[in-house]
Image (tube, rainbow, N blue to C red):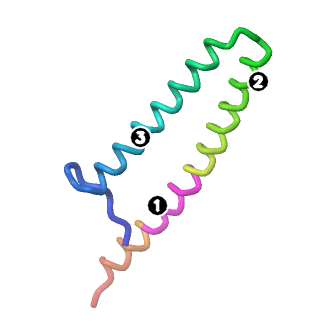
Amino acid sequence: MVMAATPGTQENQGLDTALQALARAYADAMTVITATADVGAAFTGAAQIGDLLRELGDDLAARRANLTADLRKSLIQSAAPR
């Protein structure tokens, strides 16, 4: 059964920590790109980050679809007469 993280739980704190780390990593990468004197290298770096973010977005979409299917299955099973 799929359970959502509840605010104030250890699961939610772990997710919050991971999201903050992800945001910091992105900000750090943008700082490096912005500070790069070589415009070509900065462009290449920005493209690499964009590619990675698209891959992560695609992976996340697939995971959400699987979670939706699991949740639907769980709801159907819990509504079935016993």
Q: Which residues are magenta?
A: 61-70
Q: Are marks 2 and 3 in contact (CB under 8 Å)?
A: no
* Residue 63 higher or lower than 81, as above or below: above
Which secondary structure dominates the residues rendered in magenta? helix
Q: Which mark is residue 1?
A: none
* Point 71% across, 32% down: residue: 48
Q: What's the amino acid at mark 2?
A: Thr
Q: Secondary structure at mark 2?
A: helix
Task: Specify whether residue 52 is painted magenta.
Answer: no
Q: Which mark is residue 44?
A: 2
How many neighbours does mark 1 have within 10 angstroms: few (below 14), some (14-19), or many (20 or more)?
A: few
Q: What's the amino acid at mark 1?
A: Thr
Q: Which residue bears the numbered disc 1?
A: 68
Q: What's the amino acid at mark 3?
A: Leu
Q: Reading the chain from its start, which is encountered first: label 2 or label 1?
A: 2
Where's the C terminus, which quadrant? bottom left
Q: Which residue bears the numbered disc 3?
A: 19
Question: How many numbered marks does the figure carry?
Answer: 3
Residue 24 image offset from top left, x and y in percent: 46, 30
- Front residue of this view, candidates 25 and 67: 25
How many neighbours does mark 2 have within 10 angstroms: few (below 14), some (14-19), or many (20 or more)?
A: few
Mark closer to the observer (1, 3)? 3
Where's the N terminus, which quadrant? bottom left
Residue 9 image offset from top left, x and y in percent: 22, 55
Q: Reading the chain from its start, which is encountered first: label 1 or label 3?
A: 3
* Point 39% across, 36% down: residue: 20
Tell me the distance, in whole angstroms, between the alpha carbons under discs 1 and 3: 21 Å
Tell me the distance, in whole angstroms, between the alpha carbons under discs 2 and 3: 25 Å
